Image (tube, helix red, strand yellow):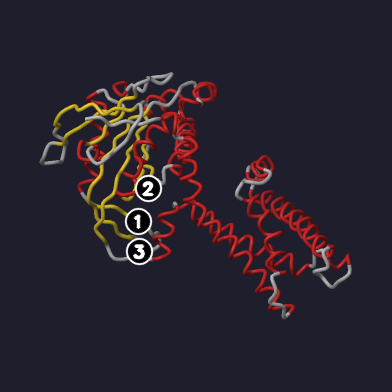
Amino acid sequence: MPCHYDSENLNAHDADIMNRYSFGFWIFVLCAVAVSGVVYGAIFYDDWSLIGAIFALFVCVPVIAFERGLLLPRLNAWVTSLSTPAYIIFSLLVFYLMVSVAFAACGGLLWFLGRLKVTWQEAVILPADILLYTMGVSLILSFVTRVRELLGRDVFASLLLGRYRKPIEEERIFLFIDLVGSTSFAEEFGDLRAQQFLSALFTAFAKPVRQYRGTIDDYIGDAAIITWPMARGLRQGNCVKCAFAIVDAIEADADKWLQKFGRVPRLRVALHGGPIVTAEVGVDHHKIAYFGDTVNTTARLESLCRTLGVPVLISSDLAKRLDLSGDIKAEYLGQHALKGRGQSLGVMALIRAKEPAFKLVARSA
């Protein structure tokens, strides 16, 4: 059964998918900033004009962009690496400077255009009350975006809307990725170094998962679980593209991995999809949890990678629903019994026509 994937034609198209996916959220953030400016003008100056919105966008957006690492990323990385007291002091200092400069630029421009009926000094010098209001709005929006990224975009929205307060049945795709040789690495370099290795690996997963509209559901030891609603994961082969994009990202940085950790990560990957029950669980700590045979089968399929000596496996049931084109082909490996599952499962290996610079050998775990 042919199942293809073209790695050469992905970047522009799939980057566009990722951009559209986040576009709506950031439009919401900008609208919230603008509304906060209008509200401020109405409360303190009895002025419902758009001047307040313009000021708010000028002064809040740079702060949010800096906090998210989009503006002055090196400075942001240095500030976030400081101890907590130093981080708070330097963050407030940077925020104050950015807000002051942005306010002066906006006020000076509007004064020059004749939109402000005040003196030039009043237009460009930041009042204390506006500084406090701006800092409050910026910190609230930054907190929301950070929680969104911490929980994952889909989980954040689901918890916010209460979508899974009552368990529902749905179809989802699961991608299990396991690091080969993590135990031997820990024995050789120690647990602390092994955790640093895993942290770097999981960080490398983030961009491909966002790009192909997946959600990292959980990290379990040296494994990561990524999931999609069935339709989204099937669309344009997102689930398969994500798996090989992760492999490609590691391959592209092979020299850096060797230099920093002395080895390049090798992975076992399993893909399966089907019906599950999704529910919000927990009291003090809420989580979206998935229940059903589909999750367990994916975990067993990942273990089968070691037995068959194949780095990437996909169930035949899921492969039949995919329509891909390119240089990744599916090779049928027959029916296999999985532990804890009454029925055997059709299994296929996903094989790249062109081998990467380093091989992912599944048997050496």
- Label 1 sits on residue: 288
Which residue occupies the foreground of this view, 312 or 10? 10
| Disc 3/disc 1 C-alpha distance (Å) | 10 Å
Point out the image quarter for the N terminus: top left
| Disc 2/disc 1 C-alpha distance (Å) | 8 Å
Q: Which comes sooner in the sequence, label 3 or label 2?
A: 3
Q: Amino acid at mark 3?
A: Arg
**Which residue of the protein is positioned furthest toward the bottom in this rendering?**
46
Please name the residue shown 80% across and 69% down the image: 115
Q: Amino acid at mark 2?
A: Asp
- Position of residue 356 relative to residue 65, above or below, is above
Q: Are marks 3 and 2 in contact (CB under 8 Å)?
A: no
- Label 2 sits on residue: 217
Q: Mark 1: which secondary structure?
A: strand
Task: Name the disc covering residue 163, or none.
Answer: 3
Classify mark 2: residues with Cα within 10 Å, few (<14), some (14-19) or many (20+): many
| Disc 3/disc 2 C-alpha distance (Å) | 16 Å
Q: Nearer the viewer, mark 3 or mark 1?
A: 3
- Taking the image as shown, residue 244 lies to the left or right of residue 193, namely left
**Which residue of the protein is positioned furthest toward the left in this rendering?**
342
Image coordinates for residue 138, horizontal then vertical, percent: 64, 60
Which residue occupies the foreground of this view, 120 or 216? 120
- Taking the image as shown, residue 243 lies to the left or right of residue 34, namely left
Q: Amino acid at mark 1?
A: Ile
| Count of labels in the image | 3
Q: Which comes sooner in the sequence, label 2 or label 1?
A: 2
Classify mark 3: residues with Cα within 10 Å, few (<14), some (14-19) or many (20+): some
